Image (cartoon, coloured by chain):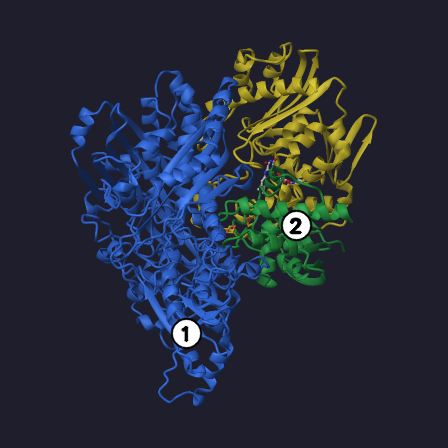
Amino acid sequence: MNTNTRSSTGIGARVPRLELQRLLSGRGRYIDDIKLPRMLHVCFVRSPHPHARIVSINVEPAKQARGVEAVLTAADINPRCEPFVGVALHRPGHRSAPQLLLASERAVWQGQPVVAVIADSLAEAEDAAELVAIEWAPLPVVGDQMQAIAPGTPAIHPELDDNVAFDFSLERGEPAKAFAEADYVIEEEFRFERQMAMTLETRGLIADFNPGDGSLTVIHAHQSPFQMQDVFSRHLKIPEHKVRVIAPDIGGGFGMKLNLYVDEMAAVVASMVLGRPVKFCVDRLESFVSDAQARDHRIKARIAFMKSGEIVAMEMDDIAAVGAYGMPMRFNVAEGMMAITITGAPYSFENYKARTRSIYVNKNLIGMYRGVGMPLACIATELLTDLAADKLGIDTVEFKRRTYRPKSSLPCITPGGQRLETVSFHECLEKLVELIDYDALRKEQRKLREKDVFRGLGIATFCEQTAYGPPYYGPSGAPISTQDGCNLRLEPSGSVRCVTSLTDQGQGTLTGIAQIVADTIGVSIEQVGVIGGDSSISPYGGGAWASRGMAIGGEAALRAGTMLKHNILALAGTITQTPPEALDIIDGQVVNTRTGQPVISLADVGRIGYFRQDTLPPDHDVQLSVSASFVGNDKMYYMANGVQASYVEVDCETGFIKVLGQWAVDDCGRVINPLLVDGQVRGGIVQGIGAVLYEECIYSDDANLLNGTMADYLVPMADEMPDIVVAHVETPEASTKLGAKGIGEAGLIGAMGSVWVAVNDALKPFGARVRHQPFTPERVLDALARARSGRR
Amino acid sequence: MLFDSTLSLKHNVQIMKARNFRYIRPDSLQHAYRILEENGGDAVPIAGGQSLLAGLNMRLSAPKLLVDIGGLKELAGQSQRDGTIRLGALTRHGELLQSDLVRKQLPLLAQAAAHIGHVAIRNRGTLGGSLAYADPAAELPACSVALRATLVLGSAAGEREVKAEDFFKGLFETDLRPGELIVAVKFPAPQANTTAGFAELARRRGDFALVGLAAMVSARRDRIEGARLVYFGCVDRAKVAASVSVAVSGLAMPVLDTAAFEREIRQDLTPDDTPGLRAETKLHMATVLTRRVLNSLVMQAAS
Amino acid sequence: MTDLVGHEDVDIEATLNGKPLKRRVKARQHLADFLRQELELTGTHLGCEHGICGACTVLIDGRSVRSCLTLAAQISGKSVDTIEGLSQSGRLADLQKAFIERNAAQCGFCSSGMLLTAYELVSTGEAASRAEIREYLSGNMCRCTGYHAIIDAVEAVIAARTAGARQS
Ligand SMILES: Cc1cc2nc3c(=O)[nH]c(=O)nc-3n(C[C@H](O)[C@H](O)[C@H](O)COP(=O)(O)OP(=O)(O)OC[C@H]3O[C@@H](n4cnc5c(N)ncnc54)[C@H](O)[C@@H]3O)c2cc1C
Ligand code: FES
Ligand code: FES
């Protein structure tokens, strides 16, 4: 890394994003902005029933409709694609029925695609889709996880005998004994309703199969082009070198655009059948019944502790409803696994018992979404420890100070199995306490309570697993790459072109990469051009997920930069007849390190390196294009951490909640660009507040979605959201040169924890507790009513 | 409620592009009347389009002909004569917020308009459209009843006038006859000793209210003399909550105890259970809101 | 003879980004689809097509409107401004600069709508508090930024513009 830190655009600098002028001028190019010659549009006819048999399908009237090119059913589409079985091989016992692209005999969730209508325009495809007549025979519905596991409930997939997808338990120490002998035990139940990622841009792709050479190009609003290259090749039987997946500008991903969707696959098959480009852009209403959803957990958790303040044991029992199938490639056991393995991580205790079950229900599939199971762990841990502190009569901050894992115990493995090496709980907490003026806020809170104004202060500590390594997915059998790569080329004019395997859905990853490359080589950021997201031209890599871009892809860029710089200096040394060790690159000039004098410009190095090789010694090997890849071979993940605080006011007459202030202190290792990091934190926080206060897919008992429009599914908007203060502690990751950990999910995890604790803090004078997310006015009022009638 | 979110899922296709229809922009009000008469039930007027077009995009309705009345001068304008304020049907929600006449004479409308959607919605949505649509959670139907407004309705057959409280017939149902348009709304200038009170509980700024209250109240010193309370969001249509209005009359302010009108709230309001919100909860919220609106009037009077 | 039945195709004459526009449009096509599909002005985005998200915001006669809740046929006789035109004319320059400096856009999908709504606000020339800015932008969803940076950016532009107005 360049030690020359004068750079205003290098690592650590607040560099504005390179692509923003373009995006802010309406010149972004998102999937629905792109047209290809002879392109068709597909629209799907979907099941209106959560569970029903298909008696008959009549597509004839639709075929006759204006502009229609084809109407395809399961019989046309399914045989062309190997079915998906969404099980994680590294989780023994995980089971799923095979999933086909279009429903053929039976539909098992409301929204499952049944018929593909392909026409010249989307409006015409929709006109024709209305003419498709399907006769349905509704079947009994498995509506939620409790019903699904109740004795006598039929299995959604008869070949699996029951509805349990996965059942996993772990135990460390002697939890039963610890609970029996503890001075106090507190138990809570938590409920998390289903929610959506709700990217502002919906999912979409353009599939372009060329029958001339049997090649497939897919322009895909997807976070991982390489994952999809593999899937298209493997499942559609196209040689991998003939598959190209390109990610255009993407209007938000948040994990949702990482999953694998049968409707997207069916659109690709339609292109193969028709030999023409086919565009599939999900519309908003469709997104409600076809995007992977998230959460849907019921958790029981316990904490055991002593009068001395020592925590002696914790316990988690999680039951999650994961939809009708296992999510291909990304599975849907991860939320439960993370929830139970990360619970308690910041705190010292030895005895732990946990169980998670993933259960099939007649609902849409659960998939990846920002935070995965980590917020659930944070919420359970922080609410229980906050209540424990109360029970002991200790201030919650003081309790944290005493019971966080001390630095001296690191590295360690927590009872849940988390490896902690460079975490900084105490530093983050102290910084936060100062930032929010903790004592003053508590004083204000007490004073206002006398006036019947009920405010709550919640503090939440969290761990964030970032940048999974090969030990995580490798054993699963899923072809998910945890490496990333970077190509660099010195252009003849002295600028640098960079191609990364990463994709950018707004995180600013590409700008971060440019910073690293510029800093490493010694040029200004204006001299670096970065592109990403094309599986045919970059080195192989994972793409954007699990907060990994900067940590893994950044390290690859740093290594490539180091290599290119080495090669440039070797060439410059030859040209100027100076030993390369005596040279450095500063501000785009090769300089003599001793005198500081420029000896040759990069433009001259480039010009000679490409056009005047005749002037070089015959044996000089010019390598001005380099490629590097990086993977943290032995690491499951890096562990970032942080602490957040929420200050809320609850209107105890109406149940309405207002978040008055939100603060975050984050440790994501080395901060490459504070502007980007703060953006990730704030964006995540608002999604976290949304999850706790607003967002919910409301289903009837028989699994019909009741609020499938944006008018009724409430996302957080500007007026309700607070200002958010962000600060940092920097504890670099020890195993890489760059030292960055991830940041993508931290905001959401911590905010969900702190809002849960804050709202419950506000309700303490009533002895009420709200534990059913989202905290709608009605749920708050119900909690208060329960407390009044002596129930909790 | 903007539309029934479950409707689109009952179909096989989730659709966002409107079905085919014809469009016409009449040159005059008379022309509009003739078009409506000629096409009968096939023709639907479009004013601001802020309710209609969302439904058309989802194919929740399928008119054959849209008659764009948005440019008709006869439906625009505001005036005041002989103690009556007349607002054209095309008066935008945003104009209610900005108009000096409205702010001074009909502050209830200005207060309410601030809660309708967002600036872009208020830039297009119209008074006539809101009343014709008769959404039970909408602000303006409730305000027009509270303000004793009279609607001027016109058709090829001529004009007639209907009191707001007789206009709203039920859920999305009005007294509009086929071929008829709302031309204007006439409001009597409120009496000197009455004050407007308004509040609503909405989850987010601009959302339709879970429960709302538009009130015209007369008070002498610290005692309520008369009240005309109209709820929205928890009724099937805008109408005077007669029992509550009587029950609160005579109460001393500030109102601390809600016992005096809780029973009446249950008589007058007819909320349904909706996803995530029980009728019982809405009744409770209406009770709290009533007390708050009444007490806000004392504060207004004091300041 | 006076037309009493209307047409599925409608002739419109309007002003688009300062230039005259004469077209025949489909009656059923909303303005956003017309801009995006027929004119290939794809800077106006669609996030919901039912009026909630604000991604499709354009200006008609200087006022912000939802182009998914406006028919292309309805713009006849009116003046429409989109992100493309306002960018090119430089009228958005100070907002764009403020957005870039504060990273007030991530994926950029909400940005056209956000900028145009903000433009309407800053064009009033009046001061606005953070709370008022939040209220004004309350109909524009952003899923990425958490809003804070957007509010910062608009606040800065308002401060600069009102200061400028006081000086001149
Ligand atoms: C995001 C969003 C939020 C909203 N929030 C609210 C809110 O909080 N509160 C609220 O009250 N409304 C809200 N609305 C609806 C908005 O107020 C509409 O503007 C209003 O309901 C209808 O007015 P319009 O002029 O747009 O009517 P249109 O949509 O054009 O028409 C609505 C109906 O009225 C008929 N119609 C229109 N004008 C006349 C007339 N003069 N004579 C006879 N019939 C006529 C039409 O044929 C149609 O059936 C919201 C809308 C959106 C998109
Ligand atoms: S697309 Fe028009 S408001 Fe969402
Ligand atoms: S920047 Fe992505 S929605 Fe706003």
Q: Toward which corner of the image does residue A488 lie, by quadrant?
A: bottom left
Q: Toward which corner of the image does residue A776 lie, by quadrant?
A: top left
Q: Is mark 2 within 8 Å of ligand 3?
A: no
Q: Secondary structure at mark 1?
A: helix
Quarter placement of the N terminus of chain A: bottom left
Quarter placement of the C terminus of chain A: top left
- Say which residue label 2 marks: C119
What x and y, as percent, mark residue C70? 63, 50
- Say which residue label 1 marks: A582
Residue A135 in view: yes
Chain A visual colour? blue
Specify the subunit that label 2 lies on: C
What x and y, as percent, mark residue A398? 36, 29
Q: Residues within 10 Å of mark 2 (few under 14, many from 20)?
A: many
Q: Is residue B204 left or right of residue C22?
A: left
Please, is residue A709 above or below residue B196 in the view? below
Residue displayed at 66% across by 52% down: C59
Q: Which chain is green?
A: C
Whole-angstrom CA distance, mark 1 to mark 2, is 54 Å
